Image: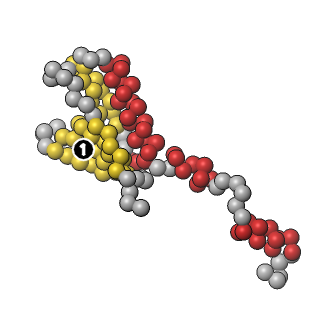
Amino acid sequence: MSDMPETYAASIEAMHSTRTAPSVADELGPFLSARAAYDALEQAVHELGRIAGEDNDIMVKAFDITVREIVYIEPYALLFRGVNDDGQHAFVLCHFSQFVARFIFKPKGAAKREPIGFRINRAPR
């Protein structure tokens, strides 16, 4: 750094030595994970449940499966568990930015509404 002017060298040194303001990654962190998408899915199911009433079933369709459980896998993945149109068990694992989900309510098929499960799978530390 001997070729640099003193003020430039000092500003580089200050930049590397302390960090007083939060970085863009720090500020956007909550939005750059699957947690925000997971929370939005859960909220949409609960809101639709209030609108649909007790005499309707709530369905989530994603990746051509009827979803029975949504699992958030820290920090970037969502696992959708359910059945495909042929009635076979199906799982889809995706990056949080790659899914599109549809929320549907229809007249109840069983005596009791079958809930959609939500689970958080914490990454090992």
Q: Residue drawn at (17%, 37%), measured in percent from left and top?
A: 85
Q: Position of residue 69 (x, y in %)?
A: 27, 40
Secondary structure, mark 1, is: strand
Q: Residue drawn at (58%, 54%), measured in percent from left and top?
A: 25
Q: Is residue 69 rendered to the left or right of residue 72?
A: left
Q: Is residue 22 rendered to the left or right of residue 13?
A: left
Q: How is the image coloured?
A: secondary structure
Residue farthest bottom in this picture:
2
Q: Position of residue 42 (x, y in %)?
A: 38, 35
Viewer-proximal residue, 125 or 74?
Answer: 125
Quickly name the residue at label 1.
81
Residue farthest right in this picture:
6
The answer to whether residue 89 is visible is: yes
Q: Residue drawn at (32%, 39%), measured in percent from left and top?
A: 118
Q: Position of residue 82 (x, y in %)?
A: 21, 41
Q: Indicate whether 107 appears above or below 23.
A: above
Q: Which quarter of the figure is the C terminus placed in?
A: bottom left
Q: Residue drawn at (43%, 47%), measured in percent from left and top?
A: 34
Q: Position of residue 96 (x, y in %)?
A: 40, 48
Q: Say which amino acid is labelled 1.
A: Arg
Q: Which quarter of the figure is the N terminus placed in?
A: bottom right
The answer to whether residue 62 is visible is: no
10 Å crowding of disc 1: few (<14), some (14-19), many (20+): many
Q: Indicate whether 18 appears above or below 9.
A: above
Quarter of the rendering containing residue 64: top left
